[in-house]
Image: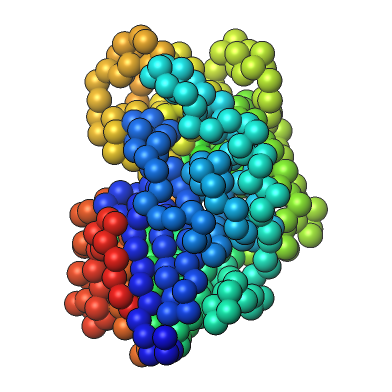
Amino acid sequence: MSSADPLKITFVTGVGTVTGANFLLETPQGAKILVDCGLVQGEKVALDENREPFPYDLGSITALFITHAHLDHVGRIPKLVKDGYKGPIYSTPQTRELAELVLEDAVNILAEEAKRDGLAPLYGREDVQAIFSQWKTIDYHTSFEAAPGVAVYLKDAGHILGSSMIEIRAGGKKILFTGDLGNSPAPLLRDSEPIGDVDHLIMESVYGDRNHEDREGRINKLEQAIKDTIARNGTLVIPAFAIDRTQVLLYELNDLVEQKKIPSIPVFVDSPMAIKATEVYRRSTDLFNDRVREQIRRGDDIFAFSHLQYTMSRDQSEAIDHARAPKIIMAGSGMSVGGRILGHEEHYLSDERNMLLLVGYQALGSLGRLLADGAKKVHIHGKTIKIKAHVETLYGFSAHKDGDHLVDFVATGTDKLKQVFAVMGEPKASMHLAQRINDELGVKAIAPERLKSYEI
């Protein structure tokens, strides 16, 4: 094969839906590179289709690259290895560290779901531990040869700590897989890096058809939600993703308390994984943006303020209900498909004094999506809960770029950019973004089909 021969990309999962990233790139030299291997999620943490065999020969895969540590990007790696993949797994050091927390936590939730459905768990704790003997780390901005004729370079995606864009040079072409792109400028992290001189772009499109509030607007809405709940002597319940969303909210709450914009009331971080992830963030301040690093240098502990409590144990979690209102509870999961948040929603949603504040994307079929769409009653732990609490959405805290900023991001490419594939979004969002890129930037863009291979 010559360098002019086409590469082939197959969108295994992660198209037509926000979750389940898993893409296969095949090069003229015979290398087969996987990017991400995540769970397909919805009404459950792991939908039944995650049990299906992988539609490629595991023995032929050259390497697996991971963009970041969210479950919809790493959640099927233990199954991949369990089913026979023996090759290397690559990511940034922070992604590896956070992925271990995410997958260890997932084991418990997957076991609960499997027991409820009368099935064997998708994988167990020993399967999670097994993958890390194959996991290697690469720093940002270090060129790396993954196979003969295949060079890989990691850029900062600005999404969560350690998140990267995977730039692959092969067959005389340069391809960039964005993973998820940060909502830059982010409160904590550095901005997403520019695309540069790539030929083909595979990019997320979660919010491809809508825009977020600006930073000032989202802070004002958070402040008002807290004040309204305090005025009712209620409880503010926030389903929050353990990685980045919790840390960003703590940072913003710290500022609101220190500036005396809100009274100092009890704030509970009720998620062992979020607590452990916060410690990883504490150890990785070199990846924060300049403004936050300066704030820390001046002595501000951005993840600590008066009346903040981290509740690791189950007993501590249950004791939260006995704490007097007003109070704030942050717990996972962010889409209310498992974890401690379900107990709090069961306890607080039926009281009109309380508020549920949704601060992230809610996947189709998830309990969080039902609540965001205005459900009057939901089922939690076998009980029917009538929704009397106030339910508000605040997507300005999303860790994803919105529609305008996704288009702006594509514009950071050069005239070399030939084609964009919009993935990791609901069909409406992906197609809307692709149309905008075509119309506004004059770059060919499509929302690809699942399991279809494209020559590039």
Q: Is residue 116 visible?
A: yes
278 sits left or right of 50 in the view: right
The residue sitting at 38% across, 77% down in the picture is: 7
Between 233 and 400, the residue placed more toward the observer is: 400
The residue sitting at 64% across, 70% down in the picture is: 140
The residue sitting at 26% across, 52% down in the picture is: 16
- Quick check: 360 above or below 401? above
430 sits left or right of 361 in the view: left
Which quadrant holds residue 63?
bottom right
Residue 75 at x, y percent in the picture = 50, 43
Between 145 and 181, the residue placed more toward the observer is: 145
Q: Is residue 341 visible?
A: no
- Quick check: 276 above or below 446? above
Residue 397 at x, y percent in the picture = 46, 49
Residue 343 at x, y percent in the picture = 49, 17
Q: Where does the N terminus fall, quadrant-wise?
A: bottom left
